[in-house]
Image (cartoon, helix red, strand yellow):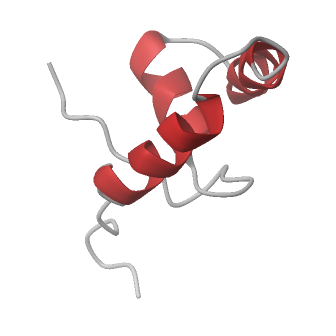
Amino acid sequence: MAAIARPRDGRMIGGVCAALARRFGTSATTMRVIFVASCLLPGPQFLLYLALWMLLPAEKPAAGAW
């Protein structure tokens, strides 16, 4: 299983939703809608997003890319 990393393209803010969407095989838009909907519930969603933003590594550039 490949390690999860924030992609270089397809980011809106930090790339966390895009990374999770790739990992679970869904679209980034679907993951973003799920995140926004979850924010209506009580809990530490924003703190979790910030923690993932800081902990998930950024995707390495492709070979030959600047």
Q: In the displayed image of the protein, which residue is found farthest to the bottom?
A: 66
Which residue is located at x 18 percent, y 28 percent?
2
Which residue is located at x 72 percent, y 23 percent?
35
Q: Position of residue 31 (x, y in %)?
A: 68, 20
Between 44 and 53, the one nearer to me in the picture: 44
Which residue is located at x 59 percent, y 56 percent?
14
Horizontally, is 54 left or right of 1 in the view? right
The picture quadrant where one finds residue 28 is: top right
Q: For residue 19, say whether it is visible.
A: yes
Q: Position of residue 4 (x, y in %)?
A: 29, 35
Q: In the displayed image of the protein, which residue is found farthest to the front?
A: 42
Looking at the rendered image, the quarter that the N terminus falls into is top left
Between 48 and 22, the one nearer to me in the picture: 48
Q: Position of residue 33 (x, y in %)?
A: 82, 20
Q: How many marks?
A: 0
Between 37 and 24, the one nearer to me in the picture: 37
Between 49 and 58, the one nearer to me in the picture: 49
Q: In the displayed image of the protein, which residue is found farthest to the left?
A: 1
Q: Position of residue 38 (x, y in %)?
A: 74, 15
Looking at the rendered image, the quarter that the C terminus falls into is bottom left
Q: For residue 6, say whether it is visible.
A: no
Which residue is located at x 82 percent, y 25 percent?
36
